[in-house]
Amino acid sequence: MKSQALSPVQSQTSVVLTSTPITGSVSLSVVFERVLERVDISESTRKTYRYGIRDFLEWNTNGELTPSSLLDYKKFLRGRSDLSTGTKNLYLNGVKTVVRTLHTHGVLERDYGKVVKGFKVNRTLKRGPITDSEIQRVFSVVRKSEDRRLLPLFSLMYLQGLRQKEILGLRVEDFEPDTLSLWILGKGRDERERVDLHPQSVRILENYLEETGRRSGYLFGSRQNPNGPMTYQNLNVLIRKVHESVGVKNKGHSWRKVFVSKLIDSGMDLLTVSSFSRHKSVEMLKVYYDRLDRTKKLPQYYEVFSTSS
């Protein structure tokens, strides 16, 4: 086995290299945290992975990392009823990322997580997009609201399909009404990308800036910290309150589902839809297509058995 350590992790944590298990003069939690700090991922992903790593370390009471640790941890996660399948995958991926990095830098003889597959997500069980009647009720509320942030927030989710974190990172300077465009920092991106704005989005944003007098800084700033953006938690609170007021049970991400579903339902080809939705691959859109196709065929299914019982 290679004896070269992950520099500077091993020198700082005194990791002892053995075939099995890997232990050291410091806790495994220190090793994992210092490795995670050096992985080339976004800060939001790093924050998410920390939850999984913390859960793994609480489960791994003996403080050892063996070739069977990740598989045993997956078995433990499988029995957890308090976590969704998506969350289980995030937890598992966080640990696998650290273990893969340890192997890449020669600390481990092999990548223990390579043979450990993620949990399969039954996408048909996920809640569908918000209905047209619900959309009308939501916009009826936000247009009348005294909180001027609500209309542009919901418009950017509905008309542009922006993710919530993308909205939070927007600055006034990113908005170019003359070219009907907005520059956003997309998911997993290092540079901002241009998004074509719907004319209605432009009008709403222009009115919002005029009413609020914003000339620079974050488009949706924090009320506690004038120089910082609105927090993800505060945005979710705003969305949830509006949803609850009109009887919508979906979460904020459902607006992106609406955006994608409506484009596909219009007859637009998936490649073009992906350019608007900024999905990395057309394959990721297939779940939307399958749901819409199934919904259209349901009336035919109902009709076949309408007189047989």
Image (spheres, helix red, strand yellow):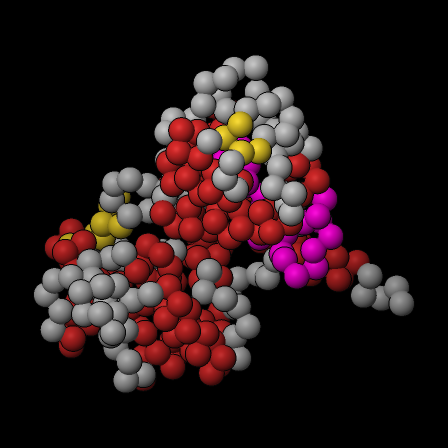
Residue shown at the point (25%, 74%) measured from the top left: 224
- Vertical placement of 169 versus 56: above or below? below
Q: Looking at the rendering, in which quadrant would you find the N terminus? A: top right
Foreground pick, 55 / 285: 55
Magenta: main secondary structure: helix
The image quadrant of residue 4 is top left
State yes or no: residue 77 in magenta: yes
Q: Looking at the rendering, in which quadrant would you find the C terminus? A: bottom right
Query: Relative to residue 200, is residue 215 drawn left or right?
Result: left
Residue 279 point in image, percent of width and height: 42, 43
Query: Relative to residue 271, is residue 76 drawn left or right?
Result: right
Foreground pick, 141 / 133: 141
- Vertical placement of 274 versus 299: above or below? above
Residue shown at the point (12%, 62%) measured from the top left: 216
Query: Relative to residue 106, is residue 303 drawn left or right?
Result: right
Q: Which residues are magenta?
A: 75-100
Residue 296 in sight here: no
Residue shown at the point (40%, 29%) measured from the top left: 11
Foreground pick, 130 / 225: 225
Residue 37 point in image, percent of width and height: 38, 41
- Vertical placement of 100 versus 271: above or below? above
Residue shown at the point (53%, 40%) measured from the top left: 28
Residue 34 point in image, percent of width and height: 41, 39
